[in-house]
């Protein structure tokens, strides 16, 4: 290769490498801010802020959803399978909200450890399958559990 | 080997190449788009949780995948233009930018349309969605930067550097859902191990991804041919070719 071109190639590649390293380090330093939500364990250990709005994400605990009879208010627990946080929400939940499904709730963490949410989003997982397959899987799982 | 590579630096050869490939790639891509859409939108089964709204993946995922790959095409052309000073390479870089921007925009818009019924929000500032928006700005930035300079050789060099620096965003977009807590779900198609999407839904999706790659190549060639026609309007080879 022509020495001048070789030099230009080296300069171009070092631009890529150095800018990647810079942005990589910035992203690493800011990773706490890039995370969309806090996990219930982070809330339990006191890492989550209590003076401003925050998001808490995790799975809705099976059997934890309580709905008020006269209002829209719903109360449920969100878990990361280590710790869990109670969330109350007075509004319309997304269609995919269900027990055992992922959610991200935006709200304020009170002194009692309960998050009063102003918005609840459903976090969809990566699994896609036809209803028949889901049914068959469920049956297989139930069969396996009873044996 | 070197002769074949050198041919790609020659405008008359590339122009002739585009002229030869477009007539059969165009109908083939259109046919694949129709077949893929009908397969994905009508014949693929509904999802057990989302029902029919999941079908937007047949547009959303292919456009998103190709917008990432297209960025590498643009950045590679930028590198060649920067190092070897081949004029055709910066034409190719500029030809890729608006196509990539359009694919990224479609991915963002279809994502928003899907996000409203599924997540409950049109837009969320999570790592995946935000880095995808940055990709869109990078494509638009390359287009705008080229317009900003009077001297087109300097403009091409600036665009090449911008597109090279922007390549860092591509692995960030790809891995964002694994590195950080995001609302966007992780990838369903896995290169190693079993995919998290059922085969009956996966095959039309893979078909659409291949089709969108072909669509990108087709649009790229159409755009490149158009730009070469403008740049070489007075070149004897083009005048001769168009006279036929």
Image (cartoon, grey):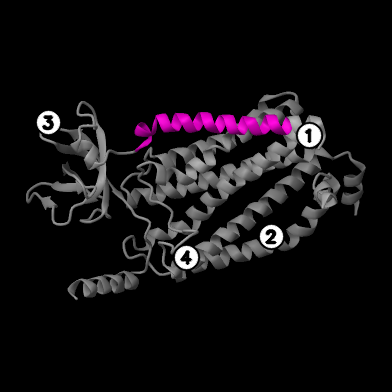
Mark 3 neighbour class, 10 Å CA radius: few under 14, some 14 to 19, many 20 or more: few
Q: Are marks 1 and 4 on the same chain?
A: yes
- Expressed as whole percent of the image width and height from the top left, the position of residue A113 reads 13, 36
Nearer to us in this view, B14 or B79: B79
Precedes in sequence: disc 1 or disc 4? 1
The residue that appears at 23% across and 73% down in the rendered structure is A144
Q: Separation of disc 1 and disc 4 at Cα?
A: 42 Å
Q: Is residue A19 above or below residue B236?
A: above
Q: Separation of disc 1 and disc 2 at Cα?
A: 31 Å
- Residue B99 seen in render: no
Mark 2 neighbour class, 10 Å CA radius: few under 14, some 14 to 19, many 20 or more: some
SS assignment at label 1: loop
Precedes in sequence: disc 4 or disc 2? 2
Q: Are marks 4 and 2 on the same chain?
A: yes
Q: Which secondary structure type mostly characterizes the magenta part of the structure? A: helix
Pointer 3 residue: A111
Mark 4 neighbour class, 10 Å CA radius: few under 14, some 14 to 19, many 20 or more: many
SS assignment at label 3: loop
The residue that appears at 66% across and 64% down in the rendered structure is B28
Residue B85's label in the rendered image is 1
Pointer 2 residue: B26
Residue B33's label in the rendered image is none
């Amino acid at each position: 290769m022509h020495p001048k071109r070789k030099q230009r190639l080296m300069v171009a590649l070092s631009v890529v490498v150095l800018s990647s390293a810079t942005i990589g380090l910035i992203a690493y330093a800011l990773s706490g801010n890039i995370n969309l939500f806090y996990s219930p364990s982070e809330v339990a250990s006191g890492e989550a802020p209590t003076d401003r709005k925050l998001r808490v994400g995790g799975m809705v605990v099976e059997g934890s959803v309580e709905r008020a009879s006269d209002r829209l208010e719903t109360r449920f627990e969100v878990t990361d399978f280590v710790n869990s946080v109670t969330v109350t929400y007075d509004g319309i939940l997304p269609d995919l909200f269900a027990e055992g499904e992922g959610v991200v709730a935006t709200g304020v963490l009170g002194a009692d450890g309960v998050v009063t949410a102003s918005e609840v989003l459903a976090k969809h997982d990566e699994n896609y399958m036809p209803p028949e397959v889901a049914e068959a899987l469920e049956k297989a799982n139930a069969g396996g559990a009873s044996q | 080997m070197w002769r074949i590579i050198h041919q790609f630096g020659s405008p008359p050869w590339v122009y002739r190449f585009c002229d030869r490939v477009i007539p059969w790639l165009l109908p083939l891509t259109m046919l694949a788009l129709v077949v893929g859409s009908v397969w994905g939108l009508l014949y693929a089964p509904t999802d057990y949780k989302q029902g029919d709204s999941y079908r937007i993946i047949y547009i959303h995922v292919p456009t998103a995948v190709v917008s990432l790959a297209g960025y590498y095409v643009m950045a590679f052309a930028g590198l060649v233009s920067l190092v070897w000073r081949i004029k055709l390479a910066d034409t190719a870089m500029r030809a890729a930018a608006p196509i990539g921007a359009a694919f990224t925009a479609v991915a963002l818009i279809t994502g928003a349309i899907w996000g409203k019924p599924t997540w409950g929000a049109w837009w969320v500032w999570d790592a995946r969605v935000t880095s995808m928006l940055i990709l869109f700005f990078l494509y638009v930035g390359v287009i705008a930067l080229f317009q900003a300079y009077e001297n087109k050789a300097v403009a091409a060099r600036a665009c090449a550097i911008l597109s090279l620096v922007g390549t860092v965003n591509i692995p960030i977009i790809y891995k964002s859902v694994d590195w950080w807590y995001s609302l966007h779900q992780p990838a369903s198609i896995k290169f190693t191990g079993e995919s998290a999407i059922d085969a009956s839904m996966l095959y039309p999706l893979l078909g659409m991804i291949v089709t969108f790659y072909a669509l990108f190549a087709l649009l790229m060639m159409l755009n490149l041919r158009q730009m070469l026609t403008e740049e070489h309007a007075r070149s004897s080879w083009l005048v001769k070719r168009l006279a036929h």
